[in-house]
Image (cartoon, grey):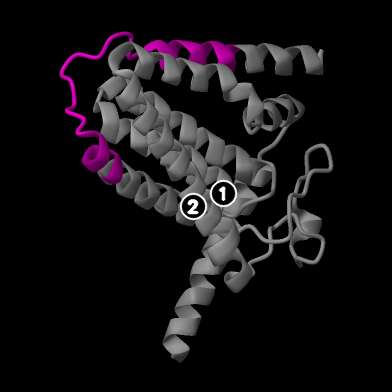
Amino acid sequence: MIMLIDALQGAMDVDTHIFLSINGAHNSFFDYFMSAYSGKLIWAPMYAAILYVMALNFSWKTMLFCMIAVALTITFADQVCATLIRPYVERMRPSNLNNPISEMVHIVDNHRGGRYGFPSCHASNTFGLAFFLFFLFRKRWLTTFMMAWAILTCYSRAYLGVHYPGDLLAGTIVGLIGAYLMYLLFMKVSGYKRKKYVLNVNAPILVGLLTIVGILIYALIKIV
């Protein structure tokens, strides 16, 4: 038991060290960029592009089941993290003023998030969507972009001081589990057969990249 406690403490120390390294490497440009990138509504056009691809390639019935599966993936990821795990683990966010390391944390726009941060809902939601699209389409470039998008989202949460890397890793695992379970349910209910060729499958990539360009321009304007 003592060895287990020592190992856990050692892992938490490493987690804190990595967090402080990420959070400490900041400047005004990335403050604006990461804050905007971490937002939810800003990605609405990319989500719309994902729905467009579904509408273009699925029957209305299959698309309906797919939308329900995506919604269930996000709901599962969010609720497992926020309702089932956080109240029992009670790991404070690094930005929480009651956390001893909070004085060392760089905060952007005075945003500190809620009290607890393990696991990260941002990580579970973004990776839940990314993994579901991987299972659904199995297209290399779309998968690569969505995974990179989710990874940078996680990085932004540590940069902004609201999550430890361990929070983000745990959230990623929850998102993967949720995506896999809901994909299996979707396959069973809808009878969907994966297509070899998917029309306009790269549309979310284009819209996502344009969104990132927009965020870059926004950050540049803000620091001028």
Local crowd size for mark 2, using a 10 Å CA cut-off: few (<14), some (14–19), many (≥20): many
Q: Quadrant of the C terminus?
A: top right
Quick check: 183 left or right of 47?
left
Give amino acid for label 1: Cys
**Circle 2 sits on which residue?**
171
Disc 1 and disc 2: Cα gap in Å? 6 Å
Residue at 59%, 61% in the rendered image? 83
SS at circle 2? helix
Q: Quadrant of the N terminus?
A: bottom left
Front residue (pair 165, 190): 190
Q: Is residue 198 magenta?
A: yes
Measuring from the top left, give residue 135's x and y in whole percent: 27, 35
Measuring from the top left, give residue 201's x and y in whole percent: 32, 14
Which quadrant of the view contains residue 143? top left
Outermost residue toward the bottom in this view: 1
Which quadrant of the view contains residue 200? top left
SS at circle 1? helix
Front residue (pair 212, 5): 212
Local crowd size for mark 1, using a 10 Å CA cut-off: few (<14), some (14–19), many (≥20): many
Residues under numbered marks 1 and 2 in contact, where contact means CB atoms less than 8 Å apart: yes
Q: Is residue 194 magenta?
A: yes
Measuring from the top left, give residue 98's x and y in whole percent: 80, 66
The label on residue 80 is none
The label on residue 121 is 1
State which region is magenta: 185-213
Quick check: 41 left or right of 115?
left
Residue at 36%, 19% in the rendered image? 54
Measuring from the top left, give residue 61's x and y in whole percent: 32, 25
Residue at 18%, 20% in the rendered image? 195
